[in-house]
Amino acid sequence: CKGCSHANTIREWEERVEQSCPFCRKPTAKTNEECHKRRMNRIKMNDPVAMCHEGSEQYEKGDYSSAFQYFTKAAELGD
């Protein structure tokens, strides 16, 4: 429902702080590599949103088998 992300955005705005991840509260990733690393950490914790996003990334790269696996796992976890 994106409620956590929305609440985090409001908190950042009210406190006038740098944008951060709603899960780990680290500053927003500056590079694609750092973003990918964080997403893979969320996938290890069975985060279905991260799995769905990774599935989309793999699909765009043309790796349909990996994309299908990520989408399937995300669906099993409820996303």
Image: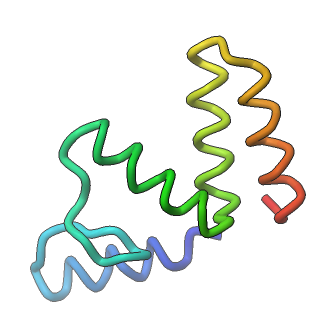
Count of numbered circles on the image: 0
List x then y, in percent, for residue 57: 56, 29
Residue appearing at x 66%, y 22% in the figure: 59
For the residue pair 15 and 68, the one nearer the viewer reads as 68
Task: Give the camera-side residue of 26 and 9.
Answer: 26
Q: Name the residue: 26% across, 69% down.
A: 20
Q: Is residue 28 left or right of residue 75?
A: left
In the drawing, does residue 68 fall left or right of residue 47? right
Task: Identify which residue is drawn at 47% across, 52% down.
Answer: 39
Along the line of sight, the residue nearer the viewer: 16 or 75: 75
Question: What kind of colouring is applied to the model shown?
Answer: rainbow
Considering every residue shown, the one lying at the far top of the view is 62
Q: Is residue 10 above or below residue 73?
A: below
Image coordinates of residue 34 in percent, x first then y, are: 28, 47
Of the 4 image quadrants, the one containing the C terminus is bottom right
Q: Quadrant of residue 9?
A: bottom left
User: In the picture, residue 63 is in which quadrant?
Assistant: top right
Residue at 57% in and 69% down: 2
> Is 75 located above or below residue 45 in the figure?
above
Left or right: where 55 falls relative to 27? right
Residue 45 image point, x, y percent: 61, 69
Above or below for 23 versus 57? below
On-image quarter of the N terminus: bottom right
Q: Nearer the viewer, residue 4 or 63?
A: 63
**Residue 4 image position (x, y, % from top left):** 50, 79
